[in-house]
Image: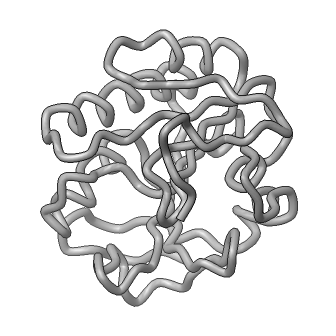
Amino acid sequence: MNLTNSNSGSWRIGTDAETAWIADNTSAGLTITSAIPPVFDRYATIVVPEDDDAAWEALDRALVSILRVESANQRWWLGYLDNSADGILFPEAPRVTLYAGWRYVLVEAGPEPALTWRKLTWRQRRSLPDLIFPTDRCWLVSRLSDDDWICVGGPAGLVHKVLRHADLETRRVELGQDATPPGHIVM
């Protein structure tokens, strides 16, 4: 299905078929597999800055630059949680259901829309989608609804770059380990 958005043109809208690999392989809990299926080489979390616009921008740009290199020339699926407080990018689009029954609009796009769409639509500090993965599913980035961190799964090289980036507060996470960053609380 393709839909048009006044800010961004015409885009392919995803269905549950594109996210079944996530839905079928994640389960509620405190481990990384509450957000990321156990199909990747490595996992990490990235702490989201509290009230620092420059830090938010640095996180967004750093993460997208790393992901862009790992999936050169691929389209990305961008998932936006249907949260009535934030509005939604494509209000008429069908939704996919993930995690604890949360509904997302899933749009096939790429790095630039990932960085800009939310800011254009909601004028919020937070710009990245709540869910991002390339069409070949070689990595996944997910921020669950109330968490103040982002979960990442992917090849060892990608996670290594995430862990080493100066603009990201990160932590490597193993399968079965509590993914909650030290000092943070699960809501």
In the image, is 174 to the left or to the right of 132?
A: right
Q: Is residue 54 above or below residue 130?
A: above
Q: In front: 7, or 141?
A: 141
Q: Is residue 5 above or below residue 168?
A: below
Q: Where is residue 16 in the image (x, y as percent from the top left)?
A: 71, 73
Q: Is residue 67 above or below residue 111?
A: above
Q: In this view, does 187 lie above or below 138?
A: below
Q: Position of residue 3 (x, y in %)?
A: 41, 77
Quadrant the N terminus occupies: bottom right
Q: Residue at x 72, y 52 (%)?
A: 30
Q: Which residue is drawn at 29% across and 76% down?
A: 86
The number of numbered discs placed on residues in the rendered structure image is 0
Q: In front: 72, or 44?
A: 44
Residue 95 appears in the picture as rendered: yes
In the image, is 54 to the left or to the right of 24?
A: left
Q: Position of residue 110 (x, y in %)?
A: 42, 44
Q: In front: 63, or 71?
A: 63
In the image, is 87 to the left or to the right of 33?
A: left
In the image, is 140 to the left or to the right of 164?
A: right
Q: Residue at x 24, y 39 (%)?
A: 56
What colouring does the structure picture have? Answer: one colour
Residue 107 appears in the picture as rendered: no
- As drawn, which residue projects farthest toward the front? 183
Q: Where is residue 134 in the image (x, y as percent from the top left)?
A: 60, 42
Q: Residue at x 49, y 56 (%)?
A: 147
The quadrant in which residue 92 appears is bottom left
- As drawn, which residue projects farthest toward the bottom? 92
